[in-house]
Image: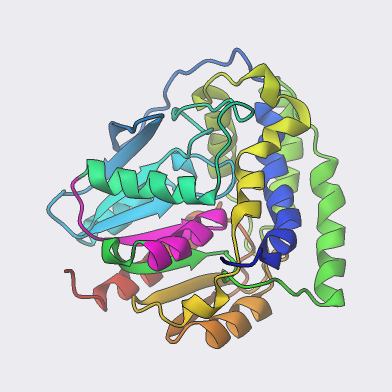
Amino acid sequence: MHKRCSIAAGTTVLLVLVAVLIIMFVQKYEGISMKQKPTNGTPFVVKTKSIELYTESFGKPANPAVLLIAGTMTSAHFWFDAFCQQIADAGYFVIRYDHRDTGLSSAIDYAKAPYVMADLVDDAVAILDAYHITKAHIVGESMGGAIAQLMALDHADRVLSIAPISSMVLAPAEFTDEEKAVQAKVFPVLMNNRPNQNYEESRTRLLTAYDSFHGDIPVDKDIAEGYIKDMYTRTKPIYPERLGAGVMHGHIVAHHSIVDRTKELAAVRVPVCFIHGEKDCLIPLRMVRQDGANHYAQATVHVVPGMGHMLLNRQLFEAVGKLLIAQFALVRPA
């Protein structure tokens, strides 16, 4: 039996900070439209025994696969179209998808069907199965990075490499007093953001909140606005039980199911490449560098100057895409 890990306690506040921007949208959209946003990706719905997962792909299926996993309460379209196409043009088959409880994937009545992180990992594996992909490069942002690391532990035979972006190492979190003070300054900015059903009224406040943890690199407003509007137009109706604070149950509570697997990380043999912002105020760069070196036998940490926790900037997406493509090129496909 694994001991319960303080990862959950250490990351919960971070997840709340990130998710509150999205959660406050979803709270009020019981009757929202499901009109799909135009995209360059090819849509495909993966049906498991209990849910449906909406996916989109870019590139040729015969090429080495890359699975993009978004963060907490975040849909496929977090991954900018041009970013997906950039990787596809480099010779890869790119898949992005809506997590359960986001976008066009199944909305879950959490009270009746609770799920844990292992279920989110199984969702990713189910997508690989549906596409008949034996192995893939797994790229995850924030919570998606935790899923990528769990895949390397529990489904190593399906993984070519993992690249957690803006994500903690799967190890107990220990923040310094200075780091806690920085987080304390960000938290009120996010909590004071109260979007409503009116997009125009909410847009400015949301953009301000995004700016607060985007580091020194400015947010591209058109990308951010498209990302916000996507939540309005592609979120399935939610269950009444999930209104208010209960909406956090899905992805936030799932993090509490992570157990202490620190001793197992050294046994991971697939390439591990952390991509992290120099100015990430939610997950300190120090922690990623220190824990990556201490717990993984071989882990690379690429630091992006000026980058915060999110990627809502064209040049930033392009820079991260180049880092990923260079990393993938070092791995020989199975």
Residue 156, x across and y down, in percent: 33, 67
In the image, taking residue 249 as reference, residue 114 lies left or right, namely: left
Residue located 67% across and 72% down the image = 172
The one nearer the camera, 205 or 236, is 236
Residue 292, x across and y down, in percent: 54, 81
Residue located 67% across and 80% down the image = 286
The one nearer the camera, 210 or 136, is 136
Residue 17 in the magenta stretch? The answer is no
Task: Give the answer, above or below, for where 155 lies relative to 169.
Answer: above
Q: Which residues are magenta?
A: 132-154
Residue 198, x across and y down, in percent: 71, 20
Task: Give the answer, above or below, for where 270 lies relative to 114.
Answer: below
In the image, taking residue 330 as reference, residue 52 lies left or right, namely: right
Residue located 48% across and 77% down the image = 265
Classify residue 114 by image quadrant.
Answer: top right
In the image, taking residue 258 as reference, residue 185 lies left or right, namely: right
